[in-house]
Amino acid sequence: MARRKERPKFVHQASTLEYLYCLGDMPKWSQLLLDQNNGNLYNDFLNWLLQKQLFKDERKISIKSMAEQSGYTSAKISKWLKEIYEDILELNELQPQLFYSLANVKIEFYMKYFDGHCTFLSSLAVIPRMYESIDFFFIKAKMGISTFWVKDIRYIIGNNETSVLIFLEGGFVNIYREFALSKALFEGYLNFSDTYQKFDFEIDEQLLKRR
């Protein structure tokens, strides 16, 4: 009996500088977090970071130099940068309205990359289309990648409001592969359950064998 191939594992572990780079890409979200007056131990450090506008030069600064300038230890800074990043993601989940722009369309992003999953709520001036690419650098520390493509778009109408759900896949789209998959599903060569129960590489093998 042939052994089942193991699914490729990918669990991203962000470095301290990666957290800093991602926070520096959207400093207004750090300000949103600080405005909550949540009493966290990192608040004074975060306020110092924003006051000094170090996010603007984050790629030129080291954790060591930040420690020398701020008076906090490198260990504390590393710990706090991770906590600040994770607390922004939590704030986005609990109070998504803070991340919306009134002039834009509310969007729920569902991102996937190997074994990594993430949800982020925000707003865009326009709704992206299928197979378009989206660069979202802030999310790199969470997902290990910053480039995604639109796999699916869904609209939910109810409770006196409309929700737009956009499902993103990490990496770059192979449109030929997506068309081949759609054809195989349409002709019954694959079942829709296969897309949930089988790994992507297993589906790809079936598609290639069919060719």
Image (cartoon, helix red, strand yellow):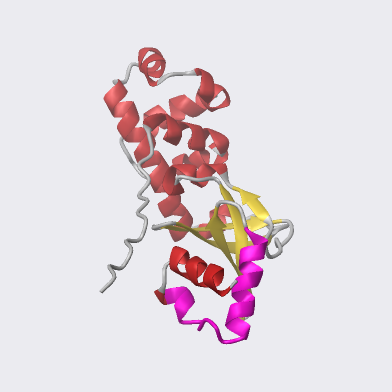
Q: Is residue 74 left or right of residue 47?
A: left
Indicate the quadrant containing the C terminus: top left, top right, bottom left or bottom right. bottom right
Hey, which residue is sitting farthest bottom in the picture? 188
Q: Is residue 161 left or right of residue 52?
A: right
Question: In this orientation, does residue 163 appear?
Answer: no
Q: Choose top left, top right, bottom left or bottom right for residue 149.
A: bottom right
Q: Is residue 148 left or right of residue 93?
A: right
- Secondary structure mostly seen in magenta is helix
Question: In this orientation, does residue 145 appear?
Answer: yes
Query: Residue at left 32%, top 61%?
Result: 6
Does residue 1 lie above or below 10 as drawn? below
Give how far across and how far down residue 70 sits, in percent: 38, 17
Q: Is residue 131 left or right of residue 108?
A: right
Report the front residue among 90 and 15.
Answer: 15
Query: Residue at left 49%, top 43%?
Result: 140
Does residue 65 lie above or below 103 as drawn? above
Q: Which residues are magenta?
A: 174-196
Label count reads 0
Indicate the quadrant containing the N terminus: top left, top right, bottom left or bottom right. bottom left
Report the front residue among 100 and 9.
Answer: 9
Q: For residue 156: magenta?
A: no
Q: For residue 191: magenta?
A: yes
Give how far across and how far down residue 8 sits, in percent: 37, 56
Give how far across and how far down residue 164 sits, in percent: 62, 69
Give how far across and how far down residue 170 sits, in percent: 53, 54
